[in-house]
Image: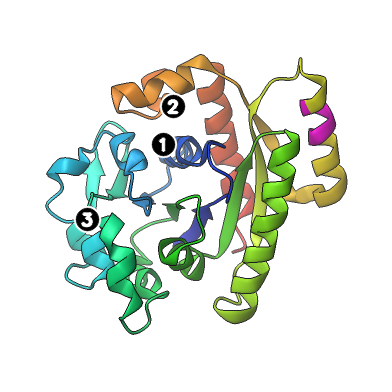
Amino acid sequence: MARIFCIANQKGGVGKTTTTVNLSAGLAKVGQRVLMVDLDPQGNATMGSGVDKRKLPLSVYDVLLESASVKEAAVFAEKCGYHVLGASRDLAGAEVELVALDHREKRLKLALADVHDDYDFVLIDCPPSLSLLTLNGLCSAHGVVVPMQCEYFALEGLSDLVHTIKQVHANLNRDLQIIGLLRVMFDPRITLQQQVSEQLKAHFGDKVFNTVIPRNVRLAEAPSYGLPGVVFDPSARGSVAFVEFAREMVDRTQGL
């Protein structure tokens, strides 16, 4: 049965999409069956998985409007080793169309129920804003993985996200929990980053993943080649860290 996780943070530019595609590729590398769902209208996770969003015959938009199933709309990203339920430009209009529909915040959950046995992990890349698309992701997930930089403003964004997760847990999805916080773009030479990292561990304890993703140029270059860093340059420090993180995810989520 698939374990479904949102990669979410209400602060932009914290590496959500980078985390989603590289964790997907890392999990595939360690033998897991993975579906990556792109819920961001920008479609960066789709393009970053080697799938051209402009040529998708069906996308997550069609799934949310129930004109296609996940099996029909998902494509296999051959170089990456995982399936992609991609986002196209149409997704930007889905917010408006969903407002008037029944079960508008649970459409993705209902669609994913059909493929529960086909995957070990479903990873959902959420937009930075709290929207109907993000709500669809949170309502369908067992938990949230929060990528964050060890900087002061990131702590403020984290408190907003924790509040949102509590609200969704109370009103829409009793299974939802924070699986863990992933420290990304980490530079141990910067004293502030070390201090924030220690604050996180003191406050959240074992909710902070042991793996730390270092600031790495190769991870930043990879999207321009339409690939996750894990595939683009497997030997890069960032890529090695994401494969290590994939192993930690498998271990940590076995009971879910």
Front-most of 162 and 21? Answer: 162
Does the residue at mark 1 contact the one at mark 2 (Cβ under 8 Å)? yes
Q: Amino acid at mark 1?
A: Ala
Instruction: Specify whether residue 194 is painted magenta.
Output: yes
Return the x and y of residue 236 as percentages of the image width and height.
Answer: 50, 16
- Tell me the residue at 22%/55% (across/down): 90
Residue 234 in sight: no
> Which comes sooner in the sequence, label 1 or label 2?
1
Per the image, label 1 sits on a secondary structure element best described as helix
Residue occupied by mark 2: 230
* The magenta segment: 193-197
Residue occupied by mark 3: 90
> Which comes sooner in the sequence, label 3 or label 1?
1
In the image, residue 237 above or below residue 101? above
Residue occupied by mark 1: 25
In the image, residue 112 above or below residue 129? below
Front-most of 96 and 38? Answer: 96
- Tell me the residue at 44%/27% (across/down): 230
Per the image, label 2 sits on a secondary structure element best described as helix
Per the image, label 3 sits on a secondary structure element best described as loop
Q: Single out the mark in the foreground, 2 or 3.
A: 3
Q: Amino acid at mark 2?
A: Val
